[in-house]
Image: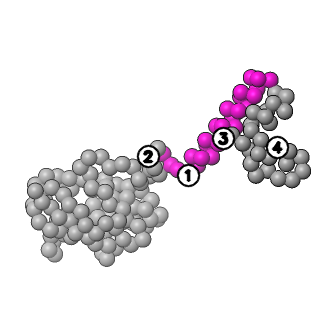
Amino acid sequence: MRIAGLSGGASSRWRSRPIAAILTRMRLSPVRQLFASLAIVGLGLSAAGCGSGPAGGADANGIGEPLPSGVLGLTAKDDAFSTDRFSAPAGTPFRIRLDNADDGIGHSVAIMSGSTQVWAGEVFTGVASRTYDVPALAAGTYRFYCTVHPGMTGTLTVGP
């Protein structure tokens, strides 16, 4: 590991030198050199992880976590869903995870058959995620939409 980018005055003599050489010149005992090296590496790893959220690319609200098997994923952001179509099995309950990526804005998902709402999930404010249990639906084509923003729509195909 090298320290780069230092400039000016006394610190310029340390520019682009390996950490071991810097620690040796500081006349630290070998044990202190080891602890100093570990501290520097730890700080570097901490800085590299800043803002990345929990493992797997998810943020603190669960957005970005991998979906369990059989869960349909949908993200609401900027008055649009991440997809305008998805499918589910006929005659079998399924789950939808809605990731609301809009800070302070409410979103939901509901399903319509023709002009009849057959299911609706609760509205929740982002940034957050919610997993809804959807009852079994008969085979067919349905419309899904956000009850807060009716212009956010898509097609749900339920089939064998």
Of labels 1 and 2, earlier in sequence is: 1
Give the x, y percent position of residue 44: 65, 42
Amino acid type, label 4: Trp
Secondary structure predominantly adopted by residues drawn in magenta: helix
Of labels 4 and 2, earlier in sequence is: 4
Q: Is residue 22 above or below residue 131?
A: above
Which residue lies under the disc numbered 1? 51
Amino acid type, label 3: Leu
Amino acid type, label 1: Gly
Which residue lies under the disc numbered 3? 43
Find out whether the residues at labels 4 and 3 contact each other: C-beta distance under 8 Å. Answer: no
Which residue lies under the disc numbered 4? 14
Q: Is residue 145 visible?
A: no
Which residue lies under the disc numbered 2? 56
The residue at the point 74 percent across, 23 percent down is: 31
Identify the secondary structure beneath mark 2. helix
| Gap between marks 3 and 1 measured at Cα | 14 Å
| Gap between marks 4 and 1 measured at Cα | 29 Å
